[in-house]
Image (cartoon, rainbow, N blue to C red):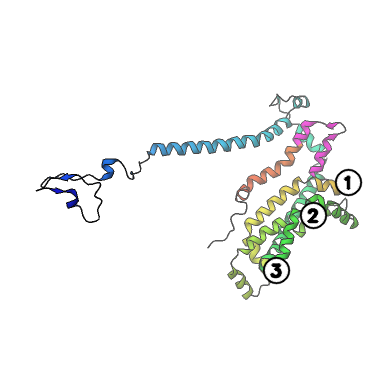
Amino acid sequence: MTQTATDILPAGADETGAAAVIVAGSNEVPKPRSARSGSGPRAPQPVAPSSIKRQRLVGRVAVYATLVGGAVMLLVPFFWLVSNSLKTDQEVSKISQLLPETAQWGNYPEALRRLGMEAEGWAVYFPALSNTVVITVLCVLGQVLSSSLVGYGFARYRFQGRDTTFMIMLATMMLPAQVTMIPVFLLFRGLGWVDTLLPLIVPAFFGTPFFIFMFRQFFSQVPEELLEAARIDGAGHLATWWRIMLPLSGPVIAIVAIYTFMFTWNDFMTPLIYLNSPENRTLALELNSFNGQYGVENRELLMAASCITMLPCVLLFFAAQRYFVDNGASTGLKG
């Protein structure tokens, strides 16, 4: 007695893939269709660990090669500056000569003398450096205090027209500085501040829209429970800003201070407009004194003076590079 494949298949099963005939008592079992015909999904083939390691190695080499190439491109001008600062005037004219034959370390004391350093006995006077330090420190202090105070007002103080005023303030960022240069100069001339350090310092105590925006975004993320606890203790808005908000905003303060320092230390246009007397000049203006009637005189001294001028910015970058990389991403708050 024989049975067909359809007689032993369960109800509803596919009859097309069954065996034609199965003899009674036989141990032969029909193979699945996928195994016989090769159709149907296939199991994923495992990837060899060596292949994964090779791909990771290639990707890592490509990333490091890109970073090294970018670093070399950025360091070439700095290397050229330092190398030319140690050459003679004749060697600077030879573009193909990368390194000096003999390092002229005497270029740096001479560059300091040209920058306005005066020595009387053991006392050394450097008016350009002192003016630059005073302006930079006061500008950093003014920007941090004013921008944080205004940012706190926009973030936590509710008043009518707050959002509209904030948008108008942000819109001023789209105005180039050249648009307001002449009106601001006329204002300071009317106040009698021309040829003084006040036009370079006072504007910093009125805040900058970009820094105000940074502080406002940070203060908006502070939990409301902290402010409620301060109000319960009897603290007003100024006490809350000074005792709670400023200590919490360390990363933002660092970013504002760093960028203000970099801009103020290297600023050339503003001192050029307002400062006329030699005793009021900054380092950026003193570098301009190397320009003669027919171009730059003593180019090796100019390179040495440029290295001296940029040294504080380089040291600041290495000391605060973490804040440059973070760029305000960390808020200092957890939870």
Q: What element carries label 2?
A: helix
| Residue toward you, 2 or 46 | 2
> Which residue is nearer to you in this view: 162 or 192?
162
> Label 2, label 3: how many angstroms apart (C-alpha)?
23 Å
User: In this picture, which residue range is highlighted in magenta?
Assistant: 276-304
Q: Position of residue 114 (x, y in %)?
A: 82, 37
Checking the image for residue 294, the label placed there is: none
Q: Which mark is residue 277?
A: 1
Judging by the rendered image, the residue that carries numbered circle 3 is 238
For disc 1, the neighbor class at 10 Å (few under 14, some 14 to 19, many from 20) is: few
Q: State which tag comes first along the sequence, 3 or 1.
A: 3
The location of residue 154, given as percent across then percent down, is: 69, 65
Where 262 falls versus 287 (above or below)?
A: below
x and y percent of residue 277 in the render?
88, 46
Quick check: 333 above or below 118? Answer: below
Residue type, mark 1 in image:
Ser
Residue 201 tag number? 2
Can residue 117 be seen by looking at this rendering?
Answer: no
Pointer 2 or 3: first along the chain: 2
> How busy is the neighbourhood of tag 2: few (under 14 within 10 Å), some, or many (20 plus)?
many
* Membership of 302 in magenta stretch: yes
Three-letter amino acid code of the residue under disc 3: Leu
CA distance separating discs 3 and 1: 40 Å
Inter-mark Cα distance, 2 to 1:
17 Å
